[in-house]
Every structure is written in structure tokens, then in C-alpha cells.
Image (cartoon, helix red, strand yellow):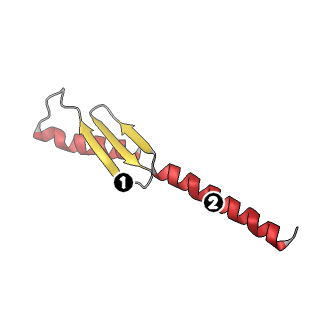
């Protein structure tokens, strides 16, 4: 295989990789638990956090809520 053909193949692979990386970065991922929903993009940026307040949440529940957010983000 000559060097010019090898370089062309490498450029094609690089362009394909850049395209796939851009698609990944524009994707959204969602993690949920019983009270919390978190959306993160492919750049690992948290885009939204939603808390379901259908149940009464008291100060005592704050620690549990923090744990649920952590679980949602890590999912």
C-alpha cells in the first residue's frame, strides 16, 4: 500500500471519528430514581434536574433526596 493511499484512509477514518464524536456530544442521556430525573448531554454536562414533589418532602428527607440525585446522575 502506498503512502498516499494510507494517508487518505487515515483522513477518512479521522473524519468518521469526528462525526461520531459530534453525534455523541449532541446526545442526551437520562437517569431516574423514584423522585428525581436528571438529563446529561454527551459532554457530561447536567442539563436538567427534576424533582417529583408528588410526595411531601421534609428537611429529614433532604439527605435521601441528595442520595437520589446522586444515583440518578451516576445512572
Q: Which residue is mark 1?
A: 45
> Viewed as shown, does residue 39 lie left or right of 60?
right
56 left or right of 37?
Answer: left
Direction from residue 9 to residue 70 in the image, left or right: left
Q: Is 34 situated above or below 71?
A: above
Disc count in the image?
2
Q: In which quadrant of the rendered image does the C terminus lie? A: top left
Mark drawn on residue 15: 2
* Nearer to us in this view, 70 or 2: 2
The secondary structure type at the circle numbered 2 is helix
- How crowded is the residue under tag 2: few (<14 C-alpha within 10 Å), some, or many (20+)? few
Which of discs 1 and 2 lies nearer the camera? The answer is 2
Q: Secondary structure at mark 1?
A: loop
Q: CA distance from mark 1 to mark 2?
A: 24 Å
Q: Residues within 10 Å of mark 1 (few under 14, many from 20)?
A: few
Q: Identify the image quadrant of residue 45.
A: bottom left
**Farthest residue toward the bottom?**
3
**Residue 58 location (% of width, % of height):** 11, 36
Nearer the observer, 37 or 10: 10
Q: Which quarter of the figure is the N terminus placed in?
A: bottom right
Question: What percent of the width, then of the height, locates residue 50?
Answer: 25, 38
Q: Furthest residue to the top?
A: 54
Looking at the image, which residue is at 58% across and 59% down? 18
Nearest the viewer among 37 and 64 is 37
Residue 9: % across, % down: 75, 62
First in sequence: mark 1 vs mark 2: 2
From the top left corner, tell me how far across and down residue 56 is, in percent.
13, 29
Q: Residue at x 54, y 55 (%)?
A: 21
Amino acid at each position: 500500500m502506498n503512502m498516499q493511499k494510507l494517508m487518505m484512509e487515515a483522513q477518512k477514518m479521522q473524519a468518521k471519528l469526528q462525526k461520531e464524536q459530534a453525534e455523541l456530544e449532541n446526545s442526551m442521556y437520562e437517569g431516574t430514581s423514584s423522585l428525581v430525573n436528571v438529563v446529561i448531554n454527551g459532554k457530561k454536562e447536567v442539563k436538567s434536574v427534576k424533582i417529583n414533589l408528588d410526595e411531601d418532602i421534609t428537611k429529614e428527607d433532604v439527605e435521601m433526596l441528595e442520595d437520589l440525585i446522586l444515583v440518578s446522575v451516576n445512572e
